Each structure stands twice: as C-alpha cells, then as structure tokens.
Amino acid sequence: MMDRKNSVAPSFKSIVRTESPDSGSPPSIGPPGDLSYRPHLNGKPHRKELMPVSPNSGLPTNQTTHAIELDTKCSSRANLTEDDVDDYFDEPYTVKYRDDLHLTFYRAMSPLINVMCVFGLWHSRVIDPLGSKSRRAGFIGRIVNGRNYGLLVLSLLWFNFLRFVPSFFVGAVLEPERLYFKVIYALFLFQCSLNHTAIFLAVTRKRSICQFFHHWEVGIQSQPKNGIDYAWLKRWSLIFAIIGVVYVTCHILNQSFGVFGPVESIRNASNIFVAPFEGHVALHLVVLICNIYCFASWIFSILIYVLICMCVIHQFNKFNRRFGRAITRGRAHGVFPENFESFRHEHEDLCYAVRLSNDHLFTYLNLISYVTMVPLACFLLYNLLFSNSISGQYSAYFMYTVWLVSIFVNICVVSWIAALVSSMAHGPRELLFQIDLRNVTMDQLIQMHTFLARVSGGPIGFSIYDLVVLSKPFILTIGGLGITYYALISEVQTSAPSTLGT
C-alpha cells in the first residue's frame, strides 16, 4: 500500500499508538518499528492506519524534516486523555498543535495583508487564535490592538450606513430626482458594512480561516513539489496592495474635490453624502473618513479573494501538468502511473484548501456581492437607459456609468476566477481516461475509481452561501438572465412608457 506523503496532518498520523482493550488505560506511544494501528476509542471505530516506521525514530520513513519537527513536539505529550486523542485524530485540521509552523505562505501575502490591517480588515489573531506565540498582553495591549481597531472600524461603517437611512424620509435632501443616488449610495454603504463584518468574523473566530493557512502550510507548502513560489506570490500580493491603495485614493480625492472644490453646483450636490443633516465642513470630514474605510472594504474584499483564487489555480495547474506527465510515462511503459495514490492525496489537499477558505469566508462574500450588486446593476441600467431624472446631467451619467462598470467588473471577476478554480479542480477527469488499464491490480483499479468519483462527482469550488458553486454554466445562466432583463424592460418601456423618475 502506498504511503501518503503529503498528509494534511502528518504529525498525528505518524504517531504510533497502542491501547489494551481491557485495561481502559490511556493510549501510549508504541515501540519503534511497529506496524500499529489506531484502535477503538470511546466505542467509536476508526480507520486502520498501517505505516512503515523508522527503527530509530519510530516515525514514517517518508516524512519531511518539517513534519518530523512537528512529530517530535507532539510525541512528547504522552499523557493525553481519550478526549484529547479524539480531538487530534478525528479533527486533524485543528490548530492546537501548529504553533511552531513557519507560515511561509502567509508571510508571502504580507504586502496585501499589512495594508488590510491598516484599514482594520485584518489582524494577527488569524494565525495565532489561541495566543500560544504571544506573551500575555498588558492592560494597554488588551485595549490597543488590531482586533479592537477592526471592531472600531466595523462600528464606524455600520454607524455611517444607519446614519444615512433616515435621509429617505427626513432631512434637507428630499428632492425626487435625488432618490436614485440615495438608493445607490445606501446599497454601497450596506455592502461595505457586510463585507467588513464577514472578514472581521472570519479572522476573529478561533477556528476559522486560520485553519486554511495552517492546512496550506502542512498539506501543501511543506512538500517541495507542491509548494507555491514565494517570489511569485509576494509579487502579486504587492501588486494587489498597490491597486487597492490607488483605488481608495482616487475615490477619496474625487469625493474631496466635489465637497471642497471650486464648483459651487458640485459642492451643493455633495451635501447628499451627509444627509439627512445639513452640509457642514466637520460633517463632510467625518463622512469622508468613513468612506475611506468603505472603499477599502469594497476593494480589498475582492483583492484577497482574487489572490487566493490565483494561488489555487496556480497549484491546480501545476498539479495537472505533473499528473499528465506521470500518465504519459505510464502509457509509454504500459504500466499504471507511478505514485498514483500520492497524486490523489495532493489533489484532495488542494480541494480541502478550497473548502476551508470558502466555508469560512468567501462563500459569505460571494453572497453579499450577488445580493447587493445584481439588484444595484439592474437599477443603474434602467436609470441610465430610460429614466428622465438625469437627462442632460452629464456628471450624473458619468458617475452612474462608472458605478455600473465597477459592479460589472466586480461580478465578472468574482464569477470568472471562481469558475476557473472549479474547472481546474475537475481537470484530472479527462486525464484519468488516458490511463492504460491492461496491467493493473485490483488496488490500483480502486484507487483510480476513487479519484474518478471525486473529480466527476459534485462540483468543487467557491460557492454562494453553499447554494450554488460558481462555475462556467452558472456564469452563462447569469448572463442569460441579464439579457432577458434588458429585453423585458426595453419592451415594457416601448409599449407603456414608465413615469418613474419623470
């Protein structure tokens, strides 16, 4: 039986434990050289684990140096209760034992993550949820820290949104022609608040996206053939950080020019930002500061998502090339591909990385994007094409067009890059049909069918609140619905002109 070289939790799969079924004593470390397996604990059966071990260390012979360091640390915990052992084996992705990892993957993303920390979208607790690396914080440290700063920014964003809601009913800006902008701006503030909330909860909860970074380091980055290129990732992280800062800066400068610029008509129109209150310099400054965090929440939630997707696509693409070469060599020699089971586990590690990042964060960000942006895009499209409220107002046309293009790019980028992840994850399916099956054993046939069932089964990728996985067929469906919407409103407008906005 072929060993799993890239086990997601190599440290605990390599600890050989024995237990007397009658004594009820806690498990102990088995003697070196055993082919032991994990017995029943608490009456629950567990899968049999057979591993050849080194007679010197008692560790699997195929473990890397990095994994052996983890094994050495974990094997010192001989006095474990049955509940602890259940935690370690039944939940192999727990963060309890990973405080000594060198998170190279996380550090390579530091340019983007550090900028997100500046805007309160990230804090270091995400990689150390149990506080095992840090010293006990003093009184000031418990108050002034990244987590509380993120909470302060989150409160500021929700306050800004709730402050603006009454402007639909009271205040100085109640003209009917300003209704469209109020709806657009309110949805924008709402989306930014939801984005920040989703990210803050993901990086704050003890067992959330932290598992993604630790799993990537243990299951993917620790293997020489699987590890992502550090320089490549850091370069793209820096590029995305610059894009985010430039985006926020441009929008803030644009709003500042409108509020404090020399054109009086634009200054008067900018009073809607502080609605329902009267326009005042102090209020404009407060709203301007809030909008800095709003624009940062909007753009960086997209950038971190795109960067993770690019990493996954890069790894799946590299895996598919290696797997394809192995199949080609096997066909040339008329044998089953070498290290097939290791390839299968490498693919599963990547799929699990996708699931961790999706379940803890990106599935909620995708839901927020579609729930807020799709209705807003429909609203903007109708307003640009058929509403008389902005007729002759070229600045309004420009602003609404820029907003619509931003939404369109956001939806397209989020959907298309997620669809590429799904396509790459299912890529080995076509390669599996090329395997030469003339001289295979039953074990090899079972391995191939297991892998084929995985890549031919349910969709793998990022989802919208676990309702639907973003894939190429889904993009075609959304595009068809958009064309149908345009045709319907065009027909309605032609047959019975609406008086909305006139």
Image (spheres, rainbow, N blue to C red):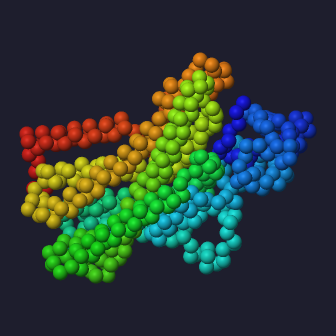
Q: Residue at x 45, y 59 (%)?
A: 236
Q: Nearer the viewer, residue 28 or 420?
A: 420
Give the image location of residue 145, x and y in percent. 56, 73
Q: Nearer the viewer, residue 160 or 138?
A: 138
- Image-based side of 388 in relation to 399, left or right: left
Q: Residue at x 25, y 58 (%)?
A: 403
Residue 141 higher or lower than 316, as above or below: below
Q: Residue at x 59, y 59 (%)?
A: 104
- Image-quadrant location for residue 474: top left
Quarter holding the N terminus is top right
Give the image location of residue 439, x and y in percent. 63, 19
Residue 17 higher or lower than 360, as above or below: above
Q: Residue 305: in sight, yes or no?
A: no
Quarter holding the C terminus is bottom left
Q: Residue furthest top?
A: 438
- Image-quadrant location for residue 91: top right
Q: Residue furthest right?
A: 23
Residue 141 higher or lower than 374, as above or below: below
Give the image location of residue 467, x and y in percent. 44, 39
Q: Residue furthest front?
A: 332
Q: Residue 221: in sight, yes or no?
A: yes
Q: Residue at x 40, y 66 (%)?
A: 242
- The number of discs equals 0
Give the image location of residue 249, x and y in percent. 33, 71
